[in-house]
Amino acid sequence: MTKNFKYVCQNCGAQHNRWQGQCVDCNKWNTIEAEQVESLATFTKAQPGSTYSIENLSTTNSRTKEHMNSGTGEFDRVLGGGLVPGSTILMGGSPGIGKSTLLLQVSNKLASEKTCLYVTGEESIEQVKLHTERLGTTNSPLHIVMGTNVSNLVSTIENMKLELDLLVVDSIQTMFIPEIPSSPGTVSQVRASAFELISLAKRKNFVLVLIGHVTKDGQIAGPKVLEHMVDTVLYLDGESGSDYRILRSVKNRFGNVNEIGVFEMSESGLKEVKNPSSLFLSERKTNASGSVVFAGIEGTRPILVEVQALVVPSNMIAPRRAVVGWELNRLSMVLAVLSARYGIHLAAHEVYLNIVGGLRIMEPAIDLAIVCALISALKKNIVENNTVVFGEIGLLGEVRKVNKIEFRIKEAMKLGFKNAIVPRSNKITKKQSGEMIVNEISHIKELESFFLHPTHAKTN
């Protein structure tokens, strides 16, 4: 068996002919390591008599994938209804954010009805036991294994007398296959270990959950192909100093992407937040300049969040722009549109923007709320407290159509909002608006009539 060396970037998985300081694919420094690999001929040689069966798709019976309830509603929501047997879930998040805590809670709840195995490669069994006791679980029927050798783990599962329903691996970066001559956590080991476990999950029809480390950029560490191999990719994140955690799906073969679940970290673990809108608006100051409520959609869930803006004069040549929870490039575009289409010039002002609650908004429908917040912060006028705003803005200053209008309005009405500023192009019907007073606009210049001086504002 011939062996050779290849130089692999541990950040992106790119291969190089020789060692070099910087990876030309991802531009990261000191991430290239030499890995000893088997020759390709060893793996491509077919076994005698081993062939694949070819079937006609039209005559193939499809097996409907039924979701398995995990007992944690917010977790099931993000997955699209629950766990799917035979599927693989990859969960990433920064250290200490609560990945192990969440999956231990899910495993403990599910273990009362299903056979669940938790594989720990980073903690001892005693440490995991202490962790579960802190979560309020003393006599958990959860099975646990401490080990990092994938070959031994596969043999252990193959010889289990009980039919396995859920396997959690914490974490995939600690797993290794002895036949591969490289250390755990390298691209070769992560890819091969994941492949073995995924193949086993499909063969045994159990749910596989892999916990993954993340890089400084917030991406799951290891080869990018790892995210392509799995069925679902989840990220658990939250602002430093905040007790709230957002679980978001960025890939899901069995549900919606960008679906979110909201949790609150407590002494007894992560608690579900059933109504995130009321949570994110709980400390909002009424009738304050620079504050606007945005009615958004995260996956299938309508959610209301407060948008705060602060605009102050600056003597700097390049005034600062700081954004939390939104894209800085998108803010630059909105500022340019305000200058060209509304007549407000902020080149001599510092601009600070914050999406309250630690939520990161991805959809462009927040543009109109951002514009209202910036105008309000600059002119010290307000948008009334009982008003929600949503709409995408184009470079011509036009307010463009958004989706799922009725869900946004229904959520706003449920929390007591009476007015909405929306795109005219949505053509909202009376059935969709209900008792909400809907103000339709087609250009940002029409916003001027909706701003009030604080002394003229009504208090709810």
Image (cartoon, rainbow, N blue to C red):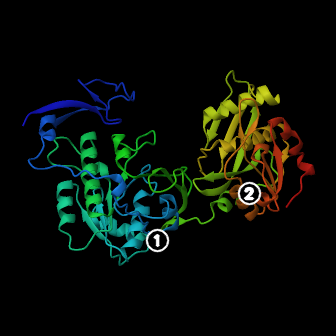
> Residue lying farthest top?
317
Residue 162 location in percent, x, y? 24, 74
Q: Nearer the viewer, residue 111 or 55?
A: 55
Q: Residue at x 37, y 63 (%)?
A: 63
Residue 372 location in percent, x, y? 78, 42
Amino acid, disc 1? Gly
The answer to whether the residue labelled 1 contacts the one labelled 2, judged by CB atoms less than 8 Å apart, is no
Residue 270 location in percent, x, y? 49, 64
| Above or below for 76 versus 234 | below
Q: Residue at x 25, y 25 (%)?
A: 19
Residue 206 location in percent, x, y? 32, 64
Number of numbered callouts drawn:
2
- Residue 149 in view in this figure: no
- Which secondary structure, mark 2? helix
Q: Which residue is mark 2?
A: 409
Where on the picture, by quarter, is residue 445? top right
Q: Nearer the viewer, residue 293 or 232?
A: 232
Crowd band around label 2 with a 10 angstrom C-alpha radius: few (<14), some (14–19), many (20+): many
Residue 71 is marked as 1
Q: Is residue 333 left or right of residue 73?
A: right
Q: Residue at x 77, y 27 (%)?
A: 339
Amino acid, disc 2? Ile
Q: Is residue 305 left or right of residue 387?
A: left
Residue 265 is marked as none
